[in-house]
Image: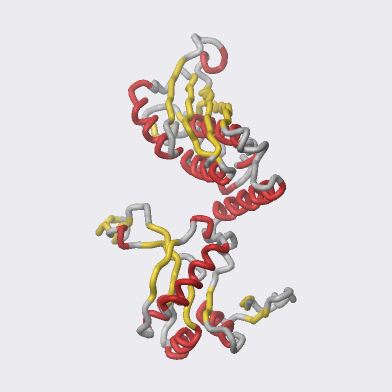
Amino acid sequence: MIAVVPPGHELPIDGVTLVVGGATRQASVAAGLAALDPGVHTVLVHDAARAFTPASQFERVIAAVESTSAGVIPGLPVTDTIKTTDGDRAMETIDRTRLVAVQTPQGFPRAQLIAAYAAATEEYTDDAALFAAAGHDVSVVAGDPDAFKITTPWDLRRAQIAEADRARRDLTDGVPTGDLSTNSTRIGIGSDIHAYDDASELWLGGLQWPGERGLSGHSDGDALSHAVCDALLSAAGLGDIGSRFGTDDPAFAGAHGEVFIAETVRLVHAAGFDIANVSAQVIANTPKVGPRRDELQGRLSALVGAPVSVSATTSDGLGFTGRGEGVAVIATALLHASR
């Protein structure tokens, strides 16, 4: 294996040839190609920022290169709607069925890749583009969500969570707590409380509530989404929302509930569980949940990937919720071991 590194980072690593990179990405890859052993026929170019790429993705790319003699890139379907813009004006909507989000490693026959680099007269954003510009075919194989690129504070936090989860699973042979064969159903309870904040807009259950009093919090104060996360983590034996998403972490400042739910669902699935359902009860004077119950349940069910039911009540004037000081939410989650 060849690692291309910045000047001054040439620390010896067993089994790794270190090469100092150039001023651009393309120059750095060219430096790595120049150091290849003569017996290498298939080359993989991988971005070290994709630190959690599974071995199966490398194997998939290698097999495709060797069977087709073409360039091969792993890609994921694009799920967001994509538009072109002119300043702040939305223009054309792009057909996302024709798009993929490209990952690494990208694989190539060695001789064609080296020839493509020698012929390149401009800078390309990835090796597949340079390879295609030289007249070679590039095909796409399935990517993997774990091959995400660490570029933002949230990516880094996601990587830290993934690493902690991997270490925990290594210690327990992949089982969070107990033997899943005899512990196939789990129930968890979660809760969250936030005080009203008239200076904030209200987000609850992943929905915005115009005209309602907002809730204070390090993130968007979405007590309902947070309680759902707490219940799911509790059922899976993965701790609680406070230990997973600290309130002192700047990566979550102002983050909406969907961010927490998406990562929580990923952790639950990685721990070997499927989500059966979640039930939550909102305890507050406002907002009135009834008029938006169907919308609320639909939004949360879509985020969780399983049925979520929401009920609401007041506390008959008792306690902080009765005095109109804030919102409390209690949630229960039911999980089944994946088969």
Residue 333, given in percent of the width and then of the height, sits at 53, 29
Is 152 on the left or on the right of 210, as rendered? right
The residue positioned 33% from the left and 23% from the top of the image is 291
How far from the left and from the top, in percent, is residue 101? 41, 62
- Residue found farthest to the front: 181
Q: Quadrant of the N terminus?
A: bottom right
Q: Do we see residue 216 in this rendering?
A: no
Nearer to the camera, 185 or 196: 185
Q: Position of residue 163 (x, y in %)?
A: 64, 53
User: Looking at the picture, does residue 1 appear above or below residue 224?
Assistant: below
Give residue 35's quadrant in the image: bottom right
Say left or right for 54 vs 67. Answer: right
Left or right, 93 with respect to 332, comes to: left
Q: How many marks?
A: 0
Q: Residue furthest left?
A: 92
The percent coordinates of residue 132 (x first, y second) are 38, 79
| Residue drawn at 47 percent across, 90 percent down | 118
In percent of the image, x 43 and y 62: which residue is there?
A: 142
User: Of residues 138 and 6, which is closer to you in this image?
Assistant: 138
Q: Nearer the viewer, residue 284 or 124?
A: 124
Q: Is residue 22 visible?
A: yes
